Amino acid sequence: MNDPHPLPPPLLHHWDWQAQAECRGMDPAIFFPSTEAPPTGRTAPTGPAKAVCQRCPVVAACLDHALQAREPYGVWGGRTEAERAELLGLESLRYPALRSRPPRRSAAGRREAWRAAMISRRTDDGPGRHG
Ligand code: SF4
């Protein structure tokens, strides 16, 4: 007789590669270096993380996961976020929708923009209703 409510298959196989990860138990800060540019203007060092990934037996599974999940931060599978974005043909993995938005204005900036628009409108329309 068929089971009308079959149990879902085990999900462990999706994650069991992590049990073999070389980075297990390491400080996560190695893989997520600060993205703030240091005062010298150099980018955060990713070399230590990449060195760990180079000897990791599950580097391919890790990179596959990061590309599928579009992990926006850190070193995964031996690749930085910029390198993963390039593999995916994207400019950036970080909130790409925000790139096209204009910068947010302060209240004073909004008032100034409104004033400029009003002045421009008066100039474009010629003399006003009373002038
Ligand atoms: S490839 Fe790197 S980040 Fe991925 S599991 Fe291995 S050591 Fe960790």
Image (cartoon, rainbow, N blue to C red):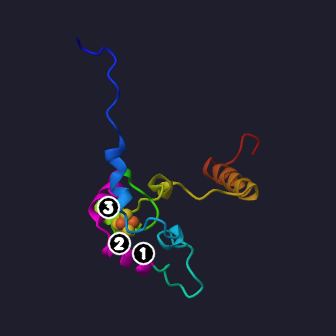
What range of the chain is rendered magenta? 46-68
Main secondary structure along the magenta-highlighted residues: helix
Q: Residue furthest bottom?
A: 40
Horizontal and vertical percent for residue 56? 32, 70
| 32 displayed left or right of 113 | left
Which residue is the site of mark 1?
49
Label 2 with label 1: CB-CB less than 8 Å? yes
Quadrant including the N terminus: top left
As helix, strand or loop, the secondary structure at mark 3 comes to helix
Rounded to the nearest angstrom, the CA distance separating label 2 from label 3 is: 10 Å
Foreground label between 2 and 3: 2
Question: Local crowd at mark 2 within 10 Å, few (<14), some, or many (≥20)?
Answer: many
As helix, strand or loop, the secondary structure at mark 1 comes to helix
Disc sitting over residue 53 in the figure: 2
Q: What's the amino acid at mark 1?
A: Ala
Q: What's the amino acid at mark 3?
A: Leu
Horizontal and vertical percent for residue 117? 65, 52
Horizontal and vertical percent for residue 79? 35, 69
Q: Residue at x 69, y 48 (%)?
A: 127
Task: From the viewer's side, name the closer residue of 94 and 16.
Answer: 16
Res 40 → quadrant: bottom right
Q: What's the amino acid at mark 2?
A: Cys
Q: Residue at x 72, y 54 (%)?
A: 115
| 37 displayed left or right of 2 | right
Find out if the beta carbon at label 2 lies less than 8 Å from the nearest ligand 1 atom. Answer: yes
Which residue is the site of mark 3?
63
| 96 displayed left or right of 84 | right
Question: Local crowd at mark 1 within 10 Å, few (<14), some, or many (≥20)?
Answer: many
Find out if the beta carbon at label 3 lies less than 8 Å from the nearest ligand 1 atom. Answer: yes
Query: In the figure, 116 relative to 56: above or below?
Result: above
